[in-house]
Image: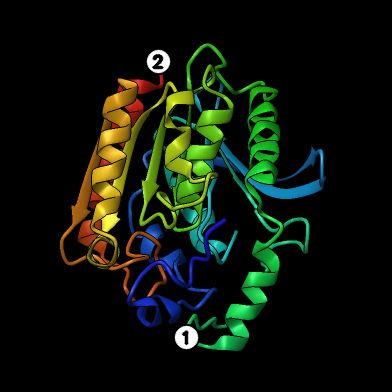
Amino acid sequence: MPDDSTNTVSRRDFAALTLAAGATAVAGAAQAAEVVEIDVSIKTPDGTCDAVLFHPAGKGKWPAVLVWTDALGLRPAFRDMGKRLAAEGYVVLVPNPFYRSRPAPVFTGPFDFANPTDRAKLAELRKLLTPDAVTRDGTAFLAFLDAQKVTNTKKKAGVQGYCMGGPMTMQTAAALPGRVGAGGSFHGGGLVTASPESPHLLIPKMKASFYFGVAMNDDQKEPETKDKLKAAYAAAGLPAKIEVYDGAMHGWCVPGSAVYNQPAAERAWAELLALYKGALV
């Protein structure tokens, strides 16, 4: 798994994320429907994962969506994002990707990616998130979603990820091609690498439509990434929309980040909803 601390030229800005922040920013977006929020535990091949499940209140069944967080994990900002998505008519699971190490919140204070000590702490946690581990987790998480009475298993599932969650989204879509119908990556890091395990090499195994929202500074550092993604999806005959967000820095979608860009984040959110509306059928 690529190190999220090295995939852009401007990590210091994103570093100023205060983990308790974010609730106010997303809560400002009106919830279209009442949402049920439940803390859950999920058995995986590697242990028990703490997670949060959201779904619309009332009777009904809705498509499933798995959310992979960024490198700072499950925290209030991602709870609010999950709640907001559920209000749109989805059963949403946001797991703690670092459950093998400790329950969420994994970090309880300010985290600075420019600080070597903080980066070392994160690297220790992330080394357990191998491609195989992510595949096992994604399979277990979607199985959990499909076991919920409120999940409409007749409709395809969605998977979305932020920063380090971008490649995890691709790995999940490749592992479950018959189940995952749409994937969204937002300021994803390490989508195209020189490794034989590079996520872009998994594209021929997928059947999902994808949307990639690329940060401007990520594109400046690795401008070839978008081109290689476009070529790989075209070769596989799969629909993919890949856009660079001018003026939006790595981490712009997550409320609470010093680089949170609300207009760009709302545009990305609208693209995600449009993707799900068309593909989760």
Residue 20: x %, y % from top left = 54, 74
Query: How many C-alpha atoms fall within 10 Å of the one at disc 2: few (<14), some, or many (≥20)?
Result: few
For residue 114, above or below residue 85:
below
Which residue lies at the image location 42% right of the left edge and 58% below the top edge?
189
Q: Is residue 112 left or right of residue 183?
A: right
Residue 111: x %, y % from top left = 54, 81
Judging by the rendered image, the residue that carries numbered circle 1 is: 114
The three-letter amino acid code for the residue at tag 1 is: Ala
Badge 1 marks a residue whose secondary structure is loop
232 or 277, which lies in front?
A: 232
Q: Is residue 151 left or right of residue 31?
A: right
User: Which quadrant does the N terminus fall into?
Assistant: bottom right
Which residue lies at the image location 43% right of the left edge and 21% below the top edge?
207
Q: Earlier in the sequence, mark 2 or mark 1?
A: 1
Residue 140: x %, y % from top left = 71, 33
The reply to whether residue 158 is visible in this rendering is: yes
Tell which tag, 2 or 1, sits nearer the viewer. Answer: 1
Q: Is residue 92 left or right of residue 162?
A: right
Badge 2 marks a residue whose secondary structure is loop
273 or 124, which lies in front?
A: 124
Which residue lies at the image location 45% right of the left edge and 49% below the top edge?
166
